[in-house]
Image (cartoon, helix red, strand yellow):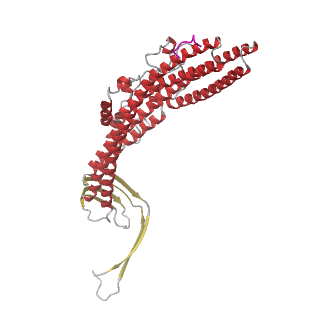
Amino acid sequence: MSRRPRSIWVGGFAAGVAVCALLPLTASLARGETVESALAQAYQNNPTLNSQRAAVRVTDEGVPQALSGYRPRITVTATGGEQSLSSTSKVVGGTVPPGSPATYFTQSGYNAPYGAGATISQTLFNGFQTANRTRQAESAVRAARATLRLAEQTVLLNAVTAYMNLLRDTAILDLQRRNVEVLQEQLRQVRDRFNVGEVTRTDVAQSESRLAAGRSQVLTAEANYKASGATYRQVIGSNAGKLTPGTPVDRFSPPNLPGAVGSASAGHPAVTTAEHNVDVAQLQVKVAEGALYPTVSVQGNVQKNYMAVGNLNTIESYNASVLGTLSMPLYQGGAEYSAIRQAKETLGQKRLDLDTARDQVRQTVVQSWGQLDAAKSNIDATTAQVQAAEIALNGVREEARVGQRTTLDVLNAQQELVNARVALVTAQRDRVVASYTLLAAVGRLAPEVLGLHVAVYNATVHYEQVRDNWAGVRTPDGR
């Protein structure tokens, strides 16, 4: 055991775990899958992220719906059918002498009336409701884009975590398997010494017990490895290949805590989303107040009928008109006033949500900064722990050879070394994940910042395609 290299990423531990510059990399690892390639896959394939992109496209359609208030509404009507009509009329006046019996005139027959017409209406003024609805829809689009950025950060952070967890569990599994190999050799040596009377049955039992515990730890490590692989498949979208070490991304984060807090408070997607939600709520107040204003509209109508309904004498008729309408609401049961008060309360709630978002972002940044500092220090501590455990194991073995140490002392020293190496693996994983967590807390975990080789999703493309679209049911992607 004393002749094994200190780095758990060389020799038998080819799977590796993300480390900083302290640990060497082999040429074979450099050709494997990287954190960046895994993040690119997650950015393209993750269903949660694709669902959020679809949600943004759904929100985009609110803008043309609001803009429709500026556009005319045209209706075309057509009528046709059969009618049977019979009417009796009383003839009064004219040439009928006074006192003469009344004269009646009866008319009956069949005809097929039909006609066509068109109506066009245009709202000229509605209390600025259309303008405010349009601005509200645009603010909702900006909020949806900020929510998409937040979803991107969550997915990318989950992808990094899944990647690093799989690396960690791969290395731990390899450590535990090698520990079993060492314990098996230790048990063989103890049994040989027992056979020649150098040790007692107790020493053999202690070695057997420690070997059984080591095998149990291998089974646990295998279960953790399989679980991490399944999580990797879920988040990244593909099965893991040969994973190479990742590196921290401290260079993309602010150099000090005040700068990190200020950057997050100003540009974190959660804060941006809350700010746009305030705008949406404020414009909803104006929309609700618009219901108290008068409405001005103009309507044009044209109608052409043949064989009028209810009249056998009319053969053809034509009607055209252009009318303006002014409607002034006076009282509508009080619903409009309640809607205004409700919108104002919602606005107050969204402002409180904005304060909450800023506080949460600040707390997350401070927490992430502390975790990163702790992870950096933990690397040094666990590295020293491994070095000390290796020296201690070598010393205990030498002392055991001359009878100054027992078999149990050797087994304990071996287990302490394994535990130290597991702690180092975990610390190195935590170091990388903590750097990405801080970057996400600041609001900068994005493919553009990381320099991922992937086409960045541009939410404005779909927006521009549908914003001024007057008609059509086919989506821009052809559906």
Q: Residue at x 34, y 50 (%)?
A: 349
Quarter of the rendering occupied by the N terminus: top right
Let me know if residue 13 appears in the view: no
Q: Is residue 416 left or right of residue 22?
A: right
Let me know if residue 212 appears in the view: yes
Q: Is residue 196 above or below residue 126?
A: above
Q: Main secondary structure of the magenta part?
A: loop
The picture places residue 267, in percent across and down from the top left corner, at 31, 35
Q: Residue at x 55, y 16 (%)?
A: 392
Q: Nearer the viewer, residue 232 or 56?
A: 232
Q: Is residue 219 left or right of residue 167?
A: right
Q: Nearer the viewer, residue 403 or 411?
A: 403
Q: Is residue 39 left or right of residue 345?
A: right
Q: Is residue 348 magenta?
A: no
Q: Is residue 348 above or below residue 434?
A: below
Q: Is residue 5 magenta?
A: yes
Q: Nearer the viewer, residue 380 or 234?
A: 380
The picture places residue 103, in percent across and down from the top left corner, at 35, 82
Quarter of the rendering occupied by the C terminus: top left
Residue at the farthest bottom position: 99
Q: Is residue 219 left or right of residue 193?
A: left
Q: Nearer the viewer, residue 248 or 408?
A: 408
Question: Magenta segment, which residues?
Answer: 1-8
- Looking at the rendering, which quadrant does residue 208 occupy? top right
Q: Is residue 64 above or below residue 40?
A: below
